[in-house]
Structures are given as structure tokens and as C-alpha cells.
Image (tube, coloured by chain):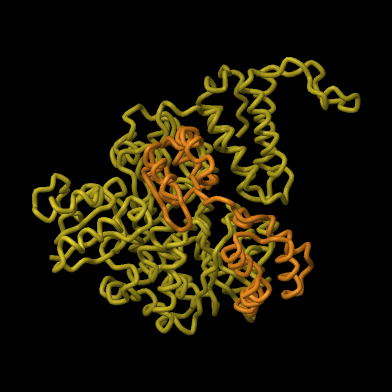
Chain colours: A yellow, B orange
Amino acid sequence: MRICISEDTLAIACGANQVAAALVQAAPDAEILRVSSWGMHWLEPLVEIDGIGYGPVGVEDVAAILGGSSTLAIGTIAEHPFIQKQQRLTFARAGKTRPLSLEDYQANGGWLGLNKARKLSPKAIIETVTKSGLRGRGGAGFPAGIKWKTAHDAEGAKKYIVCNADEGDSGTFADRMLMEGDPYCLIEGMAIAGLAVGAGKGYIYVRSEYPHAIAKLNAAIKASAHIFAPFAIEVRAGAGAYVCGEETSLLESLEGKRGEVRAKPPLPALEGLFGKPTVVNNVLTLAAIPYILAHGAQTYADYGMGRSHGTMPIQLAGNLKYGGLFETAFGITLGELVNEIGGGTESGKPVKAVQVGGPLGAYHPVRDFHLKFDYEAFTAVGGLIGHGGIVVFDETADMLSQAHFAMEFCAVESCGKCTPCRLGSVRGMEVLDRIRAGGRAKADQVESLPQMHNASKTGRGLDEQMTLISDLCETMKFGSLCALGGFTPYPVMSAIKHWPEDFGASTDMVKDKS
Amino acid sequence: MNKEARLSEIVAAHAAREGALLPILIDIQIAFGCVDDDTKRHVARALNLSRAEVHGVVSFYHDFKEVPAKLPVLKLCRAEACQARGSEVLADEIFAVAQGRCQIEPVYCLGLCSVGPNAMIGNDVHARLDSPALARLIESL
């Protein structure tokens, strides 16, 4: 009997270790493997016995499962509709392999891309990546091939590959799952990037909230160093700063400094880590590379729509019945993701809002469900797909609170370098507090000062507060140095635009300038 | 081993690395539960930095504390995905239980966004928490 159970942090948080221990005790003769997660999170801990899945399994269910009388059976996992509907390229090995087993990796297509890349010239590798249409999966969607070419063409005795694994967006976990479940895939992608741009050293910057991913990566690097040599990879842990997910702030942090954002230009591809040409790519971007090299640019580019080629590991989170990882070609609609794949809300109440793209992404109402998952389609309606996280809220959500949280989060996490973000976020919280109070009847102490020529001496009503918040959002959007201050207006203004009633405002008070 | 010796050991372990300050501070935080003024002075001297530079880095990152926590620290995720699954109500409900037993700190995302509300104690993670489950967890600390 062959029993597989995930050792992903999420499965462990749901009790997988206790279930595994119970299985060892109850079936001492069985072969028990700890594998990566299939990404069907509502079924975790998911136990697979000779291909048949059972979940979610508690310690008390073990006897029934081994006795064949369990009602938790879901049939063959690989044929489950949630898996069948996906197009898994980056996560092809998810659920099937032991994360640190070189044998499993090799037997499932591992190192094919690196071996192919070694036979190509750097220019040919970059051309393959460019032709695949791969765009940065961290959120900005910048073409990976162009970034690589810029770093390749830059003068520099030393160059670096930096993997951005500071996955701080709420509602995203694909980087974590990949690092914990298939670390060699990321390592292979980085080694290929090193060959392409002529870099000898790579850093993986992982947030400190992911201790299991850090441990897995360190073990994987140690075990496979002989395969990707002479390239060298080192893992660096963050220290709890969300803004370090911004690439220039991440570079500052890697250099051992405060994670303050740098002005661009110079681009990191020209002057990055320690002033050297540096490719900074997200985990998912680098992890897509081995497939592209192994199967050819066109095979990858054939997936997707418009200018969004390939697949996106979409993360279904929040109040959803069937949350988890869903990798599919670009072009699926938001409604399909939420209702058909995700099964609607777990609470059973109607969906009110869906935040796409993390804390800096817009809140979308149900009438946006026709939107296709594509970089341009979301940009066109004042949103973004970001790192591919989808967080669903039911009707109990108060959008004024969510807008306030967006400002509060920005205030807590701002690096402090630019004024619109550092001060704007705090002023934003204050204005939203006044909106909650329905405006303010009289001017406060500061506004009453004689030198405050432009301040209203009579207080401001709700209408004026609404104007203030949209002016403030516009300033933050266009005046901030990076996406933290620049995108915080997305959740705020989308909440105001689609749910003015939660702000006590009428639709004509909404001054959306975006 | 006294504190000075332990500090020197940590600094020496990382001194040869590029951008050594952050890995050093992370190990110090783990070893002592905080990065205090004496420590900053020691690290500044060892790395040939000013105390202001070291203080600037220490004060920037949320993980570094001025004083060690008196009680076990429970990090409760307060980000959007957990909010959508009831973390705010949970935080209010659990406040009384936590008094005197543990220190509840907010964390913005543990990457378990489909099975929240989630919490982390040390490196241990816990998902699908409701009031009774979280109360049991706190009482077991």
C-alpha cells in the first residue's frame, strides 16, 4: 500500500503531521510518502492511498479510511474536476513528488530545461524566453525576456539573479507552495537565468513568515548544488517588511540596509544589487522557465489570450467553498473562478466583493464577473491581477472598513521615503474616519489657525470629504515612488465607486478620476 | 557563554557574506529575543558602521524588537483573506482569553489564505481557527 500525504505548511497547519503519525501507527507495513500539495485546500489534510483521495482527514478518520468504510473518499485525485479543469505547467508536479527527492524531480521532467539551456547560447536562451511571451508574475507583468536582455547587454564583471520570494500579498500562496513543494523547479529556473545573463550568483529573498519554505530551499540547494554549479544560490530571509516585495526595496534589504525604495531609473537590470546588473524576478516567473526551455517557446505561448501568454497559478482564497491553487491559461473569467471553480462563498451568503491582486488590488463587484483574467482586461477597469490572488468577501463585508484597512496597511508598511505614501496613507485614514462620521460640522484646531488660508473654517460635509479622498488618492497614485503608495488608491477608490452606500454617500458624490 | 561572546560568534558566522547586517540581526533577534542598544553598538563596531546606521535598519523591520516579549507571542493573521473568513470577530472574542497568557500580535498574511483564520506561534502554524480552537491553543501555551 502506498500512502501519500502533503507536507505543505497549509496541510501541516490543518493537522497533516498528526494524521501522518496516526497512519504510520495504524498501517506499519504501508509505504508512507510526504509529498507536495495538490492545491485542493478545502480537502487538506488530503490522504492519497493508491491513487484514491480522502479528505479532509482527521486523526479520528484514519481507521475508517484504512478499513475501506470512510465517507471521505473523493475518487482518483488526478481525475477530480478541480484538477481536470486546470492546465498545470508550473505546478505539473504538485501533489505527485516528494519535494526534496532529486530522484522524483528527475523522473518527472526535472533538469530538462537546464540541460537544454546548457546547449544554447545566452542569446538563444533569452530569445526563447522572449518568444514565450512570459511576463513577470510578481504583479507588474513586465516581459521577462526584455529584462533578461537588458541585464545581459549591460556591462559588468559581476551580475546577479535575485528571486523575489517576499510574497506578502494577502490571498496569495503560490510562491510558498512552489518553494515548499517543488524547490528544484525554482532552482532550475534561476540557474537558467544565470546562464542567460552571465550571472554567477543568485539570491532568493524569502519573507520571514515562511520558515518552512526557507528550510526547504536551503536543503534543496545543498542537495542539488553539484547539478547547477558553477552557479551559486543563497537564501536570504526577510524581517517582516511588506514593502521589501518591491524590487528596489528588496535589493536595499539584501544589501543589509533599510528597505527603502529606490527611484528608477537606473533600472535594476543595469544597476541593481551592489550596483551590479541584476535580474529581479518573482518565484513564479523563474519557475515557469524550465518548462519553456524544455518544451519550447511556442508551446508556452499558445496558452493564454491577447498579450497575456501562458498560464497563471491563480490563488482562490478568502470566503470560498473550494479554495486553493488553480493554474490555468489566461482568459478564464472572474465569475467562473469564483462561482464554478471556487463554488461560491463558504458562508453560503451571496458574494459582495472580490479583491483581485492582493492588498493593492481593486475590489470588484459581481457585475465585473465577466472580466477575463488577463493583465490588460483588469487594467482597463481600474484594477490589476497582481500576483494572481483572489479574495472573496460575502455580503457581511463593510467596504468602508476595507478601504480604511487599505490605508492603514499602507501606513504601517510604508517605507517612508516618499511623502504621498507616508503621509497620504495616514491622512487617508483620517478622512475615511470623518466620512464614517458623516463629515465634520466645524473646523478643527489646526484648520482654525489664521495661517491656514486654504482650510475650510466651517467644517466639511460628506460631499467635501468624498472630494478630498479622491483628490488624495489621485495624489498618491501619481506621486508615489512605488506600487505601495501608488496602488493603495485602487482598493480605496474601487470600494467608493462600487459601494457608495457603505460610505453613506450618494452616487453623485463619487468623484472617480481614475 | 556570555552575551558578548555569543554576539561575536554570530557576527563572525556572517561577516564574510555580502550584505551581512540583516542575517546578523535576524540571528541576534532569534538568540536574544530582541536587538537592544548594547547589541547595536557591538554590531556597529564589528561591521564598521555607525550606530545610527544599525539603529536605522533595526527600527525599519517589524521583526526586530527593542525588548524581549514577556509572554509567548501568538501572531494572528489580520490581512484581507483572513478578514473575509472572520478574523476580526475572532480577534475581539479571544482578547479576554489571551490576557496574561500570551501576547497577540497582528501578522499580515501567512500564505494560508484559503483556510483562515490562521495563527503562528514560533514556527508552528495553525489554520481553520474559531474561538474555541484558538482558546484551546492559547490555554496550551
Q: Residue furthest left?
A: A68
Would residue A343 appear left or right of B79 to someone viewing this image? Answer: left
Task: Give A468 or A184, whichever is nearer the viewer.
Answer: A184
Would residue A462 appear left or right of A136 to someone viewing this image? Answer: right
Quarter of the rendering occupied by the N terminus of chain A = bottom left
Q: Is residue A116 visible?
A: yes
Task: Give A433 or A460, whichever is nearer the viewer.
Answer: A433
Instruction: Name the residue at 73% across, 71% down.
Output: B42
Would residue A100 appear left or right of A232 to someone viewing this image? Answer: left
Instruction: Name the residue at 24% across, 66% down.
Output: A33
**x then y, percent, for residue B123:** 46, 58
Instruction: Name the residue at 41% across, 84% down.
Output: A226
Work out whether A214 lies above or below A461.
below
**x then y, percent, for residue A371:** 41, 38
Would you identify the image quadrant in which residue A256 lies? Answer: bottom right
Task: Give A487 or B56, whichever is nearer the viewer.
Answer: B56
Would you identify the image quadrant in which residue A87 lies? Answer: bottom left
**x then y, percent, for residue A147:** 55, 65
Task: Give A467 or A440, whichever is nearer the viewer.
Answer: A440
Would you identify the image quadrant in which residue A463 lies? Answer: top right
Instruction: Name the residue at 83% across, 25% down.
Output: A454
Q: Is residue A155 visible?
A: no
